[in-house]
């Protein structure tokens, strides 16, 4: 700033001395306010990285040349620890199986360009252990550690462009907040990425492949954002346990040997634009068949729209829907009806998943003329549902074709249920009507019922290929009824020939 004096006649005169003083002050302020550039400290190949870090001041860069360093390191200041490949490859920190390779306790520090191997075997040991806020790990290679990268009770950690392979846990976030894991390769670990009691993190554009158990595993975590990741050839692609309120967007889960996406006691999540394929159980909820655990509404209330594809077919996941007709597409992914009423689901084909159609606390729905094939648990499952009609469906190659539990006043009529384990099974259910069904080529049993249900309509029952009966008058009805295994229900009018449907 230049000082200006006014003359008596009103004209303005510049005070040159004041001008020079002001210029000096401006320059001084700029020098003070500009961030200082830190010093660069070069570590010799046979030198101690820890000694260099101890000498460094915040803002300094400690450079480590190519070589193998049998050291463990603690970073306690806001410095940059940088590996430099001078022609001998990426510098390698070998912890010798004793402890964590690098422990980061300095808020705002950065580690880049290094490889870290051979941490200790304690569950608290890691290749890199983060215990400070706003730490950045960039282009780091982590292998052969108990945990590759462990972030514990820290906020704002960034893991960018890293390669994490061959560890027990690839990346483990524990009670972390606002972490970012982006553009990493996380493969051939026991577990890929574990997010435990953590929130508001971002997992984006990572390749999480060939991990023995879980690709991406969330436990008791919320408000996390998973976008654009590829999780393939793991046992499970994505597994959520007790984890509500996360967003899972535009990811690909392919060829995972057990499950693609699996939700256990996790509700109020948003799923959009995901592709799931190549697993025997592509998309499903955990529901304990003995205790009923996992079936509570709060765990099933997720926002999953038809932009999510299973084997290139849209998932139909309907929550509190009513008075709709679902027959626009001849091929569908799994169908979930959660507290729905008066829906018509017809002319669809659902195959190669865990459940074909699942009704939860739904009533007045019609399932008609659908083909449900090769689903690895149930063709149709109804739980706490009433007043529904399942008619003229072809259900095959499932352990149980039609399964009703804690359900009443439903009608299962004129279906073909074949080539499975058990044709139709009812558990803790009553006052349902089952008639005119063809139950054939089911390996374990045509039917099972532990409750009081009606297996005929008063005149006609079902055809069972495992029931031999006499029909001397050739009227198409067995002369004796058939008791249904499991309880006291009886089909009073079993049929001697399969039913032909129009």
Image (cartoon, grey):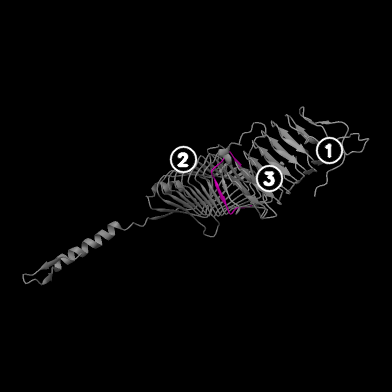
Horizontal relation, residue 412 to residue 321: left or right: right
Residue 406 coordinates in the image, percent (x, y): 66, 33
The disc label shown at residue 82, or none: none
Between 19 and 461, the one lying in front of the other is: 461
Rounded to the nearest whole Å, what is the CA distance between mark 3 and mark 2? 51 Å
Between 28 and 378, the one lying in front of the other is: 378
Occupied quadrant, residue 133: top left
Does the magenta segment cover residue 432?
no
Which residue is the site of mark 2? 153
| Among numbered discs 3 and 2, the one appearing first in the sequence | 2
Horizontal relation, residue 478 to residue 257: left or right: right
User: What residue span does the magenta drawing correspond to?
Assistant: 263-275
Occupied quadrant, residue 1: bottom left
Residue 63 higher or lower than 152, as above or below: below
Between 174 and 276, the one lying in front of the other is: 276
Residue 362 coordinates in the image, percent (x, y): 63, 40
| Among numbered discs 2 and 1, the one appearing first in the sequence | 2
Marks 3, 1: nearer the viewer: 3
10 Å crowding of disc 1: few (<14), some (14-19), many (20+): many
Which residue is the site of mark 1? 464
Q: Is disc 1 placed on a helix, strand or loop? A: strand
Residue 311 higher or lower than 293, as above or below: below
Which residue is the site of mark 3? 366
Between 437 and 233, the one lying in front of the other is: 437
Marks 2, 1: nearer the viewer: 1
Q: Is disc 2 placed on a helix, strand or loop? A: loop
The residue sitting at the left extreme is 8
Does residue 97 appear in this view? Answer: yes
Q: Is disc 3 placed on a helix, strand or loop? A: strand
Quick check: marks 3 and 1 in contact, CB under 8 Å?
no
Rounded to the nearest whole Å, what is the CA distance between mark 3 and mark 1? 24 Å
């Amino acid at each position: 700033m230049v000082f200006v004096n006014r003359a008596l006649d009103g004209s303005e005169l510049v005070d040159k001395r004041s001008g020079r003083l002001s210029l000096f002050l401006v320059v001084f302020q700029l020098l003070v306010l500009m961030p200082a550039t830190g010093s660069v400290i070069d570590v010799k190949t046979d030198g101690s990285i820890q000694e260099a870090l101890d000498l460094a001041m915040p803002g300094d860069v400690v450079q480590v040349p190519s070589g193998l360093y049998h050291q463990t390191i603690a970073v306690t200041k806001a410095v940059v620890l940088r590996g430099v490949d001078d022609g001998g490859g990426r510098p390698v920190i070998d912890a010798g199986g004793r402890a964590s390779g690098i422990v980061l306790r300095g808020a705002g520090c950065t580690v880049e360009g290094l490889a870290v191997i051979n941490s200790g075997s304690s569950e608290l040991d890691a290749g890199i252990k983060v215990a400070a806020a706003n730490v950045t790990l960039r282009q780091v290679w982590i292998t052969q550690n108990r945990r590759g990268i462990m972030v514990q009770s820290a906020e704002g950690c960034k893991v960018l462009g890293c390669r994490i392979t061959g560890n027990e846990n690839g990346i483990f976030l524990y009670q972390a907040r606002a972490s970012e894991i982006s553009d990493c390769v996380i493969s051939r670990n026991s577990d890929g990425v574990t997010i435990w009691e953590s929130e508001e993190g971002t997992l984006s554009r990572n390749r999480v492949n060939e991990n023995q158990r879980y690709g991406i595993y969330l436990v008791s975590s919320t408000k996390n954002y998973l976008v654009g990741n590829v999780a393939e050839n793991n046992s499970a692609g994505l597994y959520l346990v007790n984890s509500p309120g996360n967003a899972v967007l535009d990811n690909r889960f392919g060829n995972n040997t057990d499950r693609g996406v699996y939700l256990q006691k996790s509700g109020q999540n948003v799923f959009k634009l995901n592709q799931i394929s190549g697993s025997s159980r592509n998309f499903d909820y955990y529901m304990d068949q003995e205790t009923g655990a996992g079936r509570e509404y709060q765990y099933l209330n997720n926002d999953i729209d038809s932009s999510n594809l299973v084997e290139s077919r849209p998932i139909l996941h309907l929550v509190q829907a009513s008075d709709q007709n679902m027959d626009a597409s001849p091929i569908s992914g799994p169908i979930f009806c959660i507290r729905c009423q008066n829906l018509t689901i017809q002319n669809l084909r659902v195959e190669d998943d865990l459940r074909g159609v699942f009704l939860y606390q739904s009533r007045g729905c019609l399932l008609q003329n659908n083909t449900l094939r090769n689903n690895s648990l149930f063709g149709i499952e109804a739980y706490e549902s009433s007043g529904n009609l399942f008619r003229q469906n072809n259900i095959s190659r499932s352990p149980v074709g039609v399964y009703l539990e804690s359900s009443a006043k439903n009608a299962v009529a004129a279906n073909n249920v074949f080539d499975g384990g058990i044709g139709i099974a009812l558990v803790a259910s009553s006052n349902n009507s089952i008639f005119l069904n063809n139950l054939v080529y089911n390996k374990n049993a045509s039917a099972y019922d532990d409750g009081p249900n009606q297996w005929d309509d008063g005149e006609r029952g079902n055809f069972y290929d495992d029931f031999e009966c006499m029909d001397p008058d050739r009227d198409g009805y067995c002369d004796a009824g058939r008791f249904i295994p499991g309880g006291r229900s009886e089909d009073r009018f079993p049929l001697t020939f399969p039913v032909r449907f129009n």
